[in-house]
Image: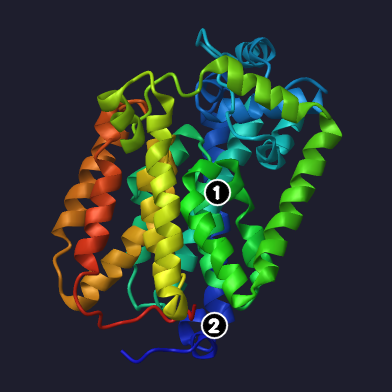
């Protein structure tokens, strides 16, 4: 298939206003149906025992001018709505995360989980649609597999943030040339878990400087500042409270299913620096990778490799955070279909991961250590031959 320009794609029948409106109506109808099911089937207690409750409790604390990182206060609020645990669920995200959590401070736990779930579904729906666009609007429905990608499904089940991070990444990939300011602003959710994106961020800064794309950095920085100001309006001490929480809770003392954490256990469980060594190496590699590819850089291809390396080297992550790798997995599927390569490897990887999620394997389980290497192996396998189609969005 010949490469299409952005203008040609916009004039494609697949992107006609009628089709877009029809798809939007289907999504809205689905969201309303899900809202109705949740309204009658969800209780405060069932909402309180999902990871979502940590964001709801933080929002409640902020709205009531209380410390959103206070363990005792958070636990009291969570128990009031039926939380059954002995330890509070506290958000470890920096204060800028609260631009998402603040609206939850004005509603109860049941209403909050309904709104949160609808937002997550809307985010993954939009992300799937953008991934379809990035891959040239092919006349098939492979992009719908995004709904059952195991990390995305884990986000939906637990109420985690990974889907919002995914949406920010794909919006950036779509708009980085045509709307650089908005593309930078779209990356704001990624600042909620900066440790997931450091190699990606290093390359982004170097690319912005090399191409003089300062509007990308401006969009990110301005929206980041606005988010911080919003949080400070409700709690002027929030940053010091965050620092105190990070010192007292021992975030890195427990095991997380990342390769960096596994390396630390193998080398010296008491040496925290070992867990950060792969991240440092990944950042150095990202700078080298960008510099060697700078004259032919394409975010829709090179950026996917950066996401994989970032996920591989991160010192702290959960399986649900791997939702950011959906565009990588889907790119591999499209390239494999184009080149005639077998889809059996990704079917096995995705199927086993899905079984783990549906079997409610705990997020802390080492049984999730294999997944990032599996997505990496799939990408290398699927893109290891000459491509028939090229991603049409220019870098």
- Residue drawn at x 52%, y 85% is 6
Q: Which residue is mark 1?
A: 164
The numbered disc on residue 16 is 2
Is 181 located above or below residue 374 in the figure? below
Q: Secondary structure at mark 2?
A: loop
Residue 369 pos. (x, y %): 27, 36
- Residue drawn at x 21%, y 41% is 352
Is 302 located above or below residue 117 in the figure? below
Q: Secondary structure at mark 1?
A: helix
Residue 4 visible? The answer is yes
> How is this picture coloured?
rainbow
Query: Between residues 25 and 330, which one lies in front from this camera angle?
Result: 330
- Residue drawn at x 39%, y 74% is 135
Is 10 located above or below residue 70 in the figure? below
Residue 130 pos. (x, y %): 49, 67
Residue 30 visible? The answer is no
Residue 105 pos. (x, y %): 74, 30
Residue 338 pos. (x, y %): 23, 77
Label located before the other in sequence (1 or 2): 2
* Snapshot quadrant of residue 387: bottom left
- Residue drawn at x 46%, y 40% is 156
Q: 370 left or right of 37?
A: left
Residue neighbourhood size for the residue with mark 1, other residues' Cα within 10 Å, grouped as few (<14), some (14–19), many (≥20): many
* Snapshot quadrant of residue 35: top right
Is 215 located above or below residue 365 in the figure? below
Are the residues flagged by discs 1 and 2 in contact, CB closer than 8 Å? no
Figure quadrant of the N terminus: bottom left
Residue neighbourhood size for the residue with mark 2, other residues' Cα within 10 Å, grouped as few (<14), some (14–19), many (≥20): few
* Snapshot quadrant of residue 361: top left
Distance Cα–Cα, label 1 vs label 2: 27 Å
């Amino acid at each position: 298939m010949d490469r299409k320009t952005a203008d040609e794609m916009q004039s494609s029948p697949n992107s006609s206003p009628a089709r877009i409106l029809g798809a939007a109506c289907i999504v809205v109808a689905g969201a309303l149906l899900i809202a109705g099911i949740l309204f009658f089937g969800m209780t405060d207690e069932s909402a309180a025992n999902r990871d979502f409750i940590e964001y709801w409790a933080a929002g409640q604390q902020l709205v009531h001018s209380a410390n959103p990182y206070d363990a005792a206060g958070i636990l009291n609020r969570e128990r009031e709505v039926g939380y059954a645990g002995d330890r509070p669920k506290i958000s470890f995200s920096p204060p800028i995360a609260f631009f998402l959590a603040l609206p939850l401070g004005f509603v109860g736990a049941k209403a909050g989980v309904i709104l949160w779930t609808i937002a997550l579904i809307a985010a993954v729906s939009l992300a799937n649609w953008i991934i379809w666009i990035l891959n040239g609007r092919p006349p098939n429905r492979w992009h719908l597999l995004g709904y059952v990608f195991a990390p995305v499904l884990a986000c939906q089940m637990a109420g985690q943030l990974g889907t919002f991070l995914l949406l920010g990444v794909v919006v950036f990939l779509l708009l980085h040339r045509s709307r650089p300011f908005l593309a930078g602003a779209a990356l704001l959710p990624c600042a909620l878990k900066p440790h997931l994106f450091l190699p990606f961020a290093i390359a982004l800064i170097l690319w912005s400087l090399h191409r003089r794309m300062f509007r990308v950095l401006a969009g990110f920085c301005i929206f980041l500042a606005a988010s911080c100001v919003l949080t400070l309006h409700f709690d002027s001490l929030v940053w010091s409270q965050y620092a105190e929480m990070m010192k007292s809770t021992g975030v890195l003392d427990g095991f997380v299913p990342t390769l960096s954490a596994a390396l630390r256990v193998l080398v010296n469980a008491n040496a925290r620096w070992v867990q950060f060594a792969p991240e440092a190496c990944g950042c150095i590699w990202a700078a080298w990778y960008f510099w060697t590819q700078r004259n032919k850089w394409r975010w829709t291809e090179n950026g996917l490799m950066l996401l994989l390396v970032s996920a591989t080297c991160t010192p702290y992550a959960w399986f649900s955070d791997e939702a950011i790798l959906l565009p990588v997995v889907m790119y591999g599927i499209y390239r494999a279909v184009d080149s005639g390569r077998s889809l059996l490897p990704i079917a096995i990887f995705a199927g086993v991961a899905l079984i783990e999620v549906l079997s409610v394997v705990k997020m802390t389980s080492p049984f999730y250590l294999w997944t990032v290497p599996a997505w990496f192996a799939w990408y290398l396998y699927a893109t290891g031959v000459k491509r028939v189609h090229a991603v049409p969005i220019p870098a």
